[in-house]
Image (cartoon, rainbow, N blue to C red):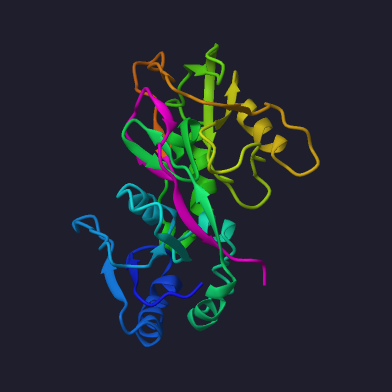
Amino acid sequence: MIFSRPILVANPHAGPPGRRRALAPLLQSFARRFPEGMVLQSLPENRLDIPKDRDLLAVYGGDGTVHRIAGLSPPSSLPILVLPGGTGNVLARHLGLSPFRFSPELLWSRLPEAETIPVRPGTLGTRRFLLMAGAGWDGLAVRRIFGKPLLGSLAYYLAGLSALFSRDLPLFSVTLTLPGGAEVRREGVRWCLISRLPPYLGPFRAILQEPPDTPLLQATLVSGGRLGIVAAFAGFLPGIPKVFRPFSLTIRAARFLDSPNGGGVPFQADGEAVPSVDSIGTAEETLTFLRFPPL
């Protein structure tokens, strides 16, 4: 694929120090390779508008940065190139770009090799997500993340342990609406993981049953005691049967009730803390991402 008028949206505060230092060389390489290219900074106070005359949208940052861009509803015909500039970079790795082998010059030379894949975002109320959304345990965990610039991915594991043993870990109910219209209700849920793309790297992977452009969602429910969350992670290990079998379904009305202690159920979307909602589904349109073959 040949591009001449790309736009690069970069988050200068994403990722550990090494990735932030890599931004300046990336911008210089981008300017040399694309004389008609355009650069925008993705900051909370910035209003981002994607011009209609661009032929590629490149995003440098973490999964949270891409999450924000997806919320802008870019045209489905505009290819999105996700560059690994964050801490976890789950989406970038899924699309074939490792942060440990990232080289701007090599990337530009590989653009003709890229294929396009359509991804239908999930929706939390009016908010979009690309990788996953979660309620309960992981929603609480993302609120306890600290020290990412120094600890890197270890910060996520420490936050998960903190949430696992927290008194604030809620119990809640989930109502799932299946494609045929039947409803399934589950009580005493500790964690509900809704996957659009592979939500985790390393050994903790939920194996998806549906392509990413389907209107169906996949939900993994973990109920009962706190050890069920640990067992669910063990179920994600390769070669070990899942403890809780995922559902492939459409969630049109999933209501997360308040926990017994009066606190609301915490939510996360693509690793970002978000307000609680009572409706989870999928967007009507798809987004187009570039995926690279393995080196």
In this rendering, the answer to whether 252 lies above or below 4 is above
Q: Quadrant of residue 142?
A: top left
Image coordinates for residue 106, horizontal then vertical, percent: 55, 81
Say if the magenta span includes residue 274. Answer: yes
Can I make out residue 132 in this image? yes
Horizontal side of residue 246 vs 216, given as left or right: right
Q: Is residue 141 left or right of residue 117?
A: left
- In depth, the one of 2 and 278 nearer the eye is 2
Query: For the image shown, how many numbered marks are present on the structure?
Result: 0
Q: Position of residue 190 (x, y in %)?
A: 53, 24
Name the residue: 38% across, 76% down: 23
Q: Quadrant of residue 46?
A: bottom left
Q: Residue furthest right?
A: 239
Is 109 displayed left or right of 273 in the figure?
Answer: right
Q: Is residue 148 above or below residue 25?
A: above
Residue 269 location, quadrant: top left
In the rendered image, residue 42 lying in the magenta stretch gets the answer: no
Picture layout, residue 274 above or below residue 148: above
Extent of the magenta region: 269-295
Up the image or down, 134 lies above or below 265; here it is below
Residue found at the far bottom of this picture: 32
Q: Quadrant of the C terminus?
A: bottom right
Relative image position of residue 261 (x, y in whole percent): 38, 16
| Picture residue at 33% right of the left edge, 38% below the top | 127
| Residue found at x 59% / y 46% | 198
Q: Is residue 143 visible?
A: no
